[in-house]
Each structure stands twice: as C-alpha cells, then as structure tokens.
Image: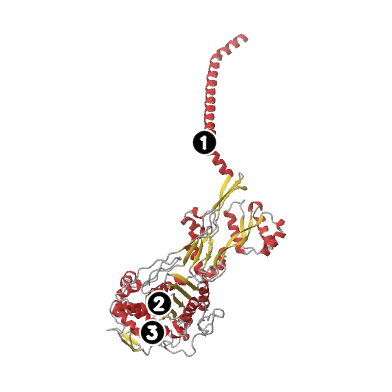
Amino acid sequence: MALFGRHRRDALKNIHAERDAFLRRAGIAVLFCAAGVVLLIVRLSDLQIVEHDHYQTRADENRMRVVPVAPVRGLIYDRNGTLLAQNQPAFVLEVTPEQIGNHEAMDALLARLSHVVTLTDADIARFKDRVRKSPRYRGVPLRSNLTMEEVARYEVDRHQFPGVDINAGLTRNYPLGASASHLVGYVGGISEEELRAANESEFLGLTQIGKTGVEKSEEDLLRGEPGAKIIEANAYGRPLRELDYQRGYPGRNLYLSIDTKVQLVAEEAMGNFQGSVVALDPRNGEIIAMVSEPGFDPQAFVSGIDNQTYQALLNDPSRPLFNRSLQGLYPPGSTVKPAMALAGLEYGVVTPEHTEYCRGEMTLPGSSRKYHCWKRTGHGPVDMAEGVKRSCDIYFYNLAMNLGIDRMYEAMTGFGLGHATGVDLPLEKDGLYPSREWKRKTRHENWYPGETLNVGIGQGYVLVTPMQLAQMVARIAMRGGGFKPHVLHATEDPITRKVTAVEPQALPKIKLKDENDWSTVIAAMESVAQEQGGTAWMVGHGAPYRIAAKTGSAQVAGLRQDEARPTAQEDLPLKLRDHALFIAFAPADDPKIAVAVIAEHGGHGASFAGPIARQVMDQYLLGYVLYGNENATEQSSHVTPSMVPGLAVPNPAKPASATENDDDDR
C-alpha cells in the first residue's frame, strides 16, 4: 500500500516540470530586477550628474530665499527747500503668531498689550486681518508710530510678551500737516486692485505707494529701485540667518514749484471760505500756490485710516477730500469778459470805441424775456474799456449776440476753458464750454439765442476749474503765449546729488490779427484795479505794483423774471449766495504771477475773492503782505483772513462805506 501510494504521488507530481517552471520564473524575476537596477542607476546618474546643477539650485532655493527690500522713498521739497514730505524714523510693534498659540492666547496677549501701548479697535481689527493673510512665522505689524513713552513701557515688561517685538523703520511724514495736502497728496497701503492693474514686480518689497497728489503722479520717480537680501531658511520657511544684502537705489528727491510762504498766506487769507486759489508763474507755467479749502491731514492715511474717521471725511458736507482746484466745476461769471473782449476784436464784431447803452436790462428781438445787468439802474453809454472796468453785462450780452456761440466756442476753448490743462497732477476734470454740437449730442435740443447771452457772461452751461481760469489769465498776461501748468520744478539724484530741472512745455500761441488788441484789453483790466470806479479799485489801491484784474460772481440760484435781486448778498441764505471770483496778474507791465480765486458763496468778487488774491500777490512780489496794513514790512507782515459773511466777523479789509462801484455782482 505504501509503495502504491508513493507511485501514485510521483504520478501526480511532475518534479522536473515544476523545477523548469521555477527556473523560468526566477530568470524572469532576475531580469526584471536587473532592468529595475539599470533604470535606477540611469535615473540616479541623470539626477546626480546630468541634472546636478538644476536640482542643486532648486535645493538652494528651498534653503536660501531672496527677499526684496523696499527702497527709501524720495523726499519732496518746495522751490526754496522747505520739506513737504519726508521719511521719519518710527517704531513698529510686531507680533509673530506662531510664537503666541491659538486665538484665545492671541486675544489674551492683545488685552495685556493694551495696558502698555494704546490700541484702538481699528488697530486690532486691522492686525487680525493681516494675521489671516500672512504666514504664522512672519511678524505682523500691530501698531505703528509708537511714542518713546510707549516703547519705554514695553521694554520694562518685555519679558511678559514672548513673540512680541519692536522694530525701527521709516514712515512717511508731512511736516506742514493739512497745508498743501491736496497738492502733495499722501501714501497708503497697496490695494489688490492696484496690484492687478500694474506689474507686480514694480512693487517688490513695498507696503505703501502714492494715492493722491504729487505722491501719486510722480510715484515712478519717488519709489526708487528695490534692493534684496538672501536669507537661509529651514524646511518650514522660517528665516534662520542673513547670507547677503544688496542695497537698492533710493527714489529721487523732488523740488516742487510752489512757494510755501505764498501757499500759507493763501490758505490763511481764505479764512472760513470754501474754495480754491491757484497762482501761476505765467513765464513758465509753474504753480506757485494751489489751495483747496478745506483741506485734510494726510498723516491719518499713512498708517491706515480707520473706517469711522474715513467715513466722517467722506460724509463731511464741506468735502475736505475734494480737490476744488482741479475737480471743482464752477460758472466763471464775469471773469471771462476780458477773453470775450479779445474775441470780439479778433472777429471784428466790435472796436474799442464801440459803445452800447446800458439801461439795466435788454430783450432779444421777438422776445419779452428780460436779461438784466448786475446794476439794475444801468451804466449808461459804455465802450469796451468801460465795459470791462465796470463789468457791464449789457455790453457783453450784445457782444455775445454779435459773436454767436460758434465763434465764442472757438475763441474761449483756445484759452483753455472747458478742457483739462494737462497739469502734472491726477484727477483733473475737463469742465465744459458748450456749443451747438454739444447740446445736440447730449440734450438732443437746438441752441437758443438766449443761451448765447448767458454764456457770454460766463453763466449758463459754462463750467470751468480754478486751474483753467488761472491758465486763461496767464495767457492773457503773456499776450497769447503761455505754458502748460506744472508743479514739478526739478528732480535730484539722492546719491550723486545731481539736480535736473524740468523744462516748461510751451502752449501754441494765440495769434491775433492785430497784436495791439492785447494792449487794449490789458489796459482795461488795469483800470479794473487801478482806477476809481473800477470794480476792484479797493483791491489795487495802494499797491506798489500795477495789477490787471477782473472780478466776477457766479449765480448759485436763479431768479424769476419779476423777482427783485437782493441789494446785499448777506440777505440771502449762505447756500444761495453767489460764488465770488477774481482773476489777476501782476505787475501788469512785466507779469510774474497770475492768480485765480474762487470763494464759494462769497457773494462779490471784489469784496471777498479780490483781497485773497491781493495778499497772495503781495507775498510773492514783495516778500510780505502789505494789503490791510500800510506800515507792513517783511518782519511785521500779517495776513487779513477773509470770513464767510454770516458765520464770522466781516472782512476788515472791506471799506465800511463801499459804493456800488466798489462791488461787482458778476
């Protein structure tokens, strides 16, 4: 039975076949292993020999990182070297979240820190938002611009705040505060929209860029070129040590054309008025002063303004963030009359001797609508010189009717009205000087003769900026010449100290058939301020230089045909009073400054806007303010502030017994 069983088992199991199968399988496995080893050797050779440099570089990148370093921002000076924007050392309180722990530990830390340094709800909210967006190993700013007292309190209890440190850095500072705030502007944090709109490489290492004013328009010059440092980091990306440092190139220092002394005089002279003052050098287009009142403190925006404060600025009815010099649109009123007189002479529709009889009102043929002069009793017979001197509306109604809107549009836009001047500052508006085509396209209506009369005295659809008015009077001063307004005077390389002046850009000359027409109109403008009976005689009286000027008022509220105009603007509510305007240049025979002033709801141009312009011209031409103080010197000079009637004491510069010839209702 045992033998039978063995034979039966041998019969069922083929040992030779199994051995052959095993050997075949083992051979195949060996071949696969050998092939795998060969492939592994080839791959290792490729990694270690062929691509050694590539992977070595990538390994170094994981270990060493290039971190951009923000350059030092350029400084901003006025034309005399007065600092308008600087970089000031500042202490920044930073917290490293990784060393603090969870949210509860962070809240407890912030509560303890609030007893050492002042922390507002806005500071804490901004910090927590930054924590969510930053790596936990990186320090996050909690408070900027710590005082020395706060730094000292922290240092005493420093051991109680692990993960908290104070670092020294630079922050933007504006020494003059709200003065020239619209012109200089301010810096602020970079928004996501700004990053998407620009090349991100331009902002390497930067946390702030210019937001308004010169800080924004000259950002490319002020920013400089970033530097870099190479740091060694661990596998988690935490910096371990600094291996190398490459210094960047600081931004250029800028010298602006404004004169800070003139700027401060203009701002003080504005008093309680809202409005604008623009002063240009007509010889090169440089902006001597640019005031928009009220202003704001740009320092609040540097470290990040809290939402409550920002909303308060936005909702302030006086609109302190609104740049009236470039964005404010106003009817120019009678300030356009000198340019209108030049247009009438150029097109030959009047001569200097042409006379119109002013009886205080007029009507168009076939119409019963009355068009009134500002002087309801009339001026009597008026020629061109008297029309400008006394600002007779009837004379210019007739001139506008004879010119027609098409020729008026061609002439007045030639002076720059209704178009942006191209000044090197952001957010300038175009304004509007109407035409038949404009009305047809925008309102789908025909042009009416009565609208031509209103436009002829700077009312109706006409809207201009104070900058456009300043450019217009500067071009008259230069007898058709002129330059594009600009505020950048020169740039300075902070390393080599090389100063490069900015070349003024000449505007196309306004050519007249008879160049003597310039003298005719300029002489009429001189009579406005230099002759008794001129609407600005009290402004020019006593000036040691000749002033060529034109007063103006722009109606805010219209009157019915049968409604009598109040004899005094003070009888109207403040919001319904006319805007007061004044344009001038001086000296009349050798122009060095051209000024445009708009005092919102000031009423009469001569009474309220004129004194502001006079004080600006005094300061620039004399070095002190003579107006309102006959014995003034550079040492004893003072500024006479203009006050909004009804809210404060009247302007002491206004004569107590002003006659109708001293005030201009247009």
- For label 3, the residue is 389
Residue 27 horizontal side relative to residue 281, left or right: right
**Which residue matches tag 1?**
51
Q: Do callouts 1 and 3 mark residues in contact (Cβ within 8 Å)? A: no
Question: Left or right: 326 with respect to 307?
Answer: left
Q: Dot 3, crowdedness within 10 Å: few (<14), some or many (≥20)?
A: many
Q: Which residue bears the numbered disc 2?
A: 332
- Whether residue 451 appears in this view of the structure is no
Mark pair 1, 2: CA separation? 74 Å
Instruction: Give the label, 2 or 3, closer to the camera.
Output: 3
N-terminal-most mark, 1 or 2: 1
Label 1 sits on a secondary structure element that is loop
Image point 54% across, 18% down: which residue? 23
State the residue at coordinates (44%, 90%). Answer: 659
* Crowd around label 2: few <14 · some 14–19 · many ≥20 (10 Å): many
**Mark 1 is on which residue type?**
Glu
Q: Could you tell me if the residues under marks 1 and 2 are in contact, i.e. CB atoms within 8 Å?
A: no
Position in image of residue 78 (x %, y %): 51, 68
